[in-house]
Image: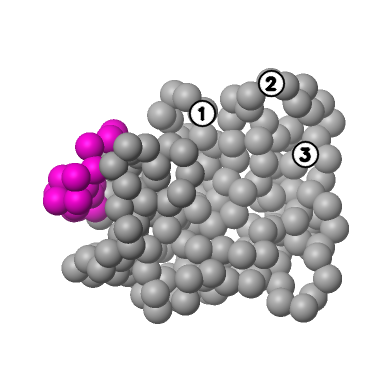
Amino acid sequence: MAEQDLFGEVPAPVARPRQSRPRPSASAPQHTWFFALRPALTDAARLDAFAEKLMTSHGVTGKRVGAERLHITLELVGHDSDERVVEAACRAADAVRFPAIDARFDAAVTFSAPSGPFVLLGSDGLDAVRELRTALGCAMAEHGFTPQRSYEPHMTLGYDPRNRVERAAIDPIGFRIAEFALVKSHIGMSRHEVLRVWPLNG
């Protein structure tokens, strides 16, 4: 199952809340807010060591993301979002009730973006992630956001625009997920700031 249609035949939800002071369109964003699943410290270290070996074996020589920034994105909140938008996203997350889940990856590939993201993918081992994302996306739609209709859960391990890898099977690897988080990414600084977490115990 590569991609998920979040809303099927249901009409698209209303537009995402408008920011009170949007940045000029010509100016690159400085921050991005998004919901994500993040491995615990021990799992992150294990996944990062796995990433190093996997990238080497496939000739991927670019920079690794690093253990502290490994994650699975659930849903974008916005770029340079104002406080009102972030608060609306938090209210949506407050409504999500979901049990702890396991994520399991079984393939790796380089996405087509110019930066050459080298990522882990999964088939049925990521079904619970897809279901959680649907629950969060529906809650966000009720608060004025417009989630993307298609969704392919993945974990980016590194970036290499020169050495690209076709989709290849790997030895399965995964981690237990007990919470999801609202993350603020400081663009260009390789820094993720966790603003709030929600436990998965539904």
Disc 1 and disc 2 in contact, CB within 8 angstroms = no
Q: Amino acid at mark 1?
A: His
Nearest the eye: 79 or 119: 119
Please identify, in this view, whether the residue under mark 1 or under mark 2 is nearer the observer: 2
Residue 186: assigned label: 1
* Sequence-wise first label, 3 or 1: 3
- Is 52 part of what is drawn in magenta? yes
Residue at point 57%, 71% (across, down): 4
Query: Is residue 131 found left or right of 22 in the rendered image?
Result: left
Which residue in the structure is indicated by mark 3?
84
Query: Is residue 163 found left or right of 46 in the rendered image?
Result: right
Q: Residue 104 in the image: x percent, y percent?
A: 32, 69
Q: Is residue 108 above or below residue 131?
A: above
Specify few, some or many for label 1: CA neighbours under 10 Å numbering under 14, 14-19, or 20 or more: some
Which residue in the structure is indicated by mark 2?
27
Report the predominant secondary structure element of the magenta stretch.
helix
Q: Residue 12 in the image: x percent, y percent?
A: 81, 65
Q: Amino acid at mark 3?
A: Arg
